[in-house]
Image (spheres, grey):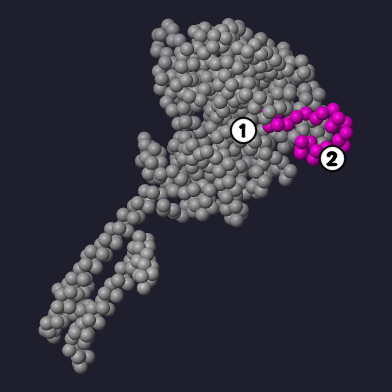
Amino acid sequence: MKKIIDKLIRLTDLTISGTIGKQLLFFTLTVIIVFTILIAALALLSPPIYDENDFINKFKNTFFSFFEISSFWTIDDFIFPEIFFIIINGLLSKVLFIGVLVTILVNAIMNRINRVKNGEVYYSFSKHIVVIGFDHICKGLITQLAGQNEIVLQTSMDVQIVRHKLFSGLDEKLRKKITIVAGNRMSCEDIGKLHIEKCAQVFLLGEINDENHDSQNIECLCLINKIASDAKKNIRCNTLFNHHLTYAAFLQHDIPGIRNNIDFVPFSFYDIWARKIFVENSYNNGEIIYKSLDHQPITADSDMNVHLVILGMSNMGIALGMQAAQICHFPNFITKGIKTRITFIDETADYNFNLLKRRLYNFFDEYDYSFRCFDEDINYNNFSQKNKFTDIEFEFIKAHFEDDSIQRYLKEASLQKNSFLTVAVALSESSTALAAALYLPSIVYNSGAHVLVRQKQSCAIVTVLSHEEEGTLYCKYKNLRPFGMHENSFNIKHTDDLLPMMIKYVYDNTTESCVIKEFPEDTIRKNWIENWKKSDNLSALKASNRYAANFISVKQRSLGIEEGKDMTAQQIELAAQMEHNRWVAEKLLFGYRSPAPDEITNITNENKREYYKAHFIHEDIKPYKDLEKDEKTVSVKNYDINISSAVPYMIAAYNKKNNIKTV
């Protein structure tokens, strides 16, 4: 009996703490049971009823008094015991209807409010943008996205805390377009509630300080793929990776089984910032302007080179170096052999360099590098290992940034008249980075070098120090710029691959040397979606087109390319060689290598394509002058020539689409 009572109590608890439907059902059953008991008691205590009308009158009186106290059909026919039950009847009705019912309704409303506040209410979303996880970049991203679409943010953090952080300082109009819901990105059920099959696109960010952030994002991506596959949809999924090693891996490799349903776009916070500084040269729509690495255009006749010094081999520091390696390819290497120099300085440079070299073995096999440790008198390089055709040299120095040897090194670098010097302080701690930047040798600032300092949260100190008042004769920190801030780091323009689509369109339409001038948007977007081979590595090829698009501004600046105007034969030739040098750096960074002599000799043409693909070999990793024809009997040089000659018209089409006016 006790177990039965306990089960009834638990069932009652579940019912009254459940949905409003269950609560109202419980209330209705209670009313029926109480009313039935009252009728039964009235029948037992009243004298026998022989007149049918008399029973009906008493039933009506009991009914009306139960549902509205003091409202009787007639009371004259009741004797004392019956009147007592009528009073009890009225009191019980008051308790049930005024007490219980009102409490249920109030509780239901409060429960609904609490569920909404805690993100437990999901709606039937459609054509929305899904953001999964509350990361550091989330607020800036959602602020931009909410101007275009309804946003659904799912987080495993405390929803009320997230709402407070997200809505702080946010316009009321934008708040109305944002729904925050609670959920775990590892749960198929929670992900399914987001109606991903109906969304416009997904931003898979992950949560702040997740230990297995990148791994969990991949697992969530697989859940999204299953939903998309069941719905027979293709969904663009922008996926954030926190570690540069993971990010690099997924730039190189496709994820098996997702290409038919997921347009996979991996991105990294660090790579975003490297692009802001070195490609876009601005932050937050021009709030901060960065000098290009070539402070002035490096032309074919120039004797100048770029020297980038990075203090700190953090994820950010490595991202800056790798981005610079993608874009620092100038025409004076072709004409004069002048190379770009990238220097990393870190107190654990030996460990970090060995780690980087293991990952990028093929890259450092083709590029000059040197390693120095001043304290231990260690100095080695690979200059004599082979005759290299590449245009960048790397330098790794093991030392603390405060060491006298580093201060002397920076002074000497500042005094080099033929170098455009940029010093990027990419230390992980903002306060330490700021101290390192502010107390660089004065000659660094006086030489006109561009100094970048990483600031994660606020850039107020650097902004104030670098502000140059009108009429000021000298401002030491005028070339100091902050970078790496979490707020407004993501630019939604990155989600539109229009320029990379144009690059692919030119490549796909190359058979012989020609100038492609027309870029119909519908055609190039369709080509981007549909015109891939089943054997293509989509992640690597799409990333390749994006990096090629990033390089357009360097060509434009160094060669004086004008929007919508034909290039000269000399401009096209130099641009094509610059493009090839960039492409070589990209392929080596992606893990490709050139074939060994025995592979060239022994691998038959029938097996060559599959063998080269399986072993990440590309036969065009060679000097531009040695390029031959590809398997389609197209001169490989034509790809570089056509991509370069189309630059003025790609710029014109892109600017027209985005209403950008050039001076």
Q: Which x, y percent locates residue 484?
A: 50, 26
Q: Which x, y percent locates residue 14?
A: 37, 63
> Compared with residue 648, is residue 174 higher up or lower down, i.e. above or below?
below
Left or right, residue 93 beside residue 329: left
| Disc number placed over residue 267 in the picture, else none | none
Mark 2 closeness class: few <14, some 14–19, many ≥20 residues within 10 Å:
few
- Residue 602 falls inside the magenta stretch: yes
Task: Quickly name the residue at label 1.
Answer: 245
Q: Amino acid at mark 1?
A: Leu
Q: Quadrant of residue 58?
A: bottom left
Which is nearer the eye, 500 or 462?
462
Which is nearer the eye, 522 or 369?
369
The residue sitting at 67% across, 39% down in the picture is 253
- Residue 283 falls inside the magenta stretch: no
Q: Quadrant of the C terminus?
A: top right
**Magenta part of the chain:** 587-615
Which is nearer the eye, 402 or 323?
402
The answer to whether marks 2 and 1 mark residues whose Cβ atoms lie closer than 8 Å is: no
The residue sitting at 77% across, 32% down in the picture is 618
The main secondary structure of the magenta stretch is helix
Circle 1 SS class: helix
Task: Quickly name the residue at label 2.
Answer: 607
Mark 1 closeness class: few <14, some 14–19, many ≥20 residues within 10 Å:
few
Farthest residue to the front: give it. 2
